Image (cartoon, helix red, strand yellow):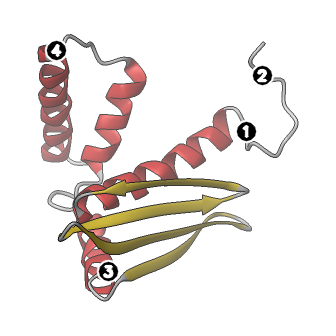
Amino acid sequence: MSKSDCRWVNEEIERIRELRKQQGHTLTPLQEGMVAAIASWDPRFDPSSAEEFRAIQANVQSGRWEGSEEWRIGTWFNSSISKFVNDGKPRFVVTVRCDGQSLACECPTLNGAYAYMRLYENIIVEQFYSVGPPWRLSEISCK
């Protein structure tokens, strides 16, 4: 990440921190990490994200984009963004499936749908490397 990219990410964290402060909330370290991650994938500042976003944008206009990405040997994301109209306004449904998990949401904009898709993919990766996948027996529990 270049210095200008870092500046953009830091500015975005500060912007969100101030918005949340006005609402009486303080960002936790995890929340700041989520803001930083989303900012680092912003297609306006990240060339690979811009290229991916343009491809998604072109396909979603006809109703649906689907993509698969192998992020570790034999482990794939199956992601999709679908467009529909509700009360005359476009809406976008994001779904990310991987390793027995499915994360999904509905967004009012394609930009938001793209941000959530990337966030969900990265949550799955970070979860895998920190606490493990949900199908694996582990010591993690809510006691």
* Residue at x 67% of width, y 43% of height: 128
Q: Earlier in the sequence, mark 2 or mark 4?
A: 4
Q: Which mark is residue 21?
A: 4
Q: Amino acid at mark 1?
A: Gly
Q: Amino acid at mark 4?
A: Lys
Compared to residue 84, the image places residue 93 above or below, namely: above
Compared to residue 71, the image places residue 12 above or below, namely: above
Do labels 4 and 3 touch, CB within 8 Å? no
Q: Amino acid at mark 2?
A: Ser
Q: Dot 3 corresponds to which residue?
A: 60
Q: What's the CA distance linking mark 4 and mark 3?
A: 35 Å
Left-right relation of 132 to 86: right
Local crowd size for mark 1, using a 10 Å CA cut-off: few (<14), some (14–19), many (≥20): some
Q: Earlier in the sequence, mark 3 or mark 2?
A: 3
Q: What's the CA distance linking mark 2 and mark 4?
A: 32 Å
Q: Residue 55: which quarter of the image?
A: bottom left
Q: Dot 1 corresponds to which residue?
A: 132
Q: At numbered mark 3, what does the secondary structure look like: helix, strand or loop? A: helix
* Residue at x 73% of width, y 39% of height: 132
Q: Dot 2 corresponds to which residue?
A: 141
Q: Residue 112: which quarter of the image?
A: bottom left
Do labels 3 and 2 touch, CB within 8 Å? no
Q: Quadrant of the C terminus?
A: top right
Q: What's the CA distance linking mark 2 and mark 1?
A: 12 Å
Q: Position of residue 76 (x, y in %)?
A: 64, 67
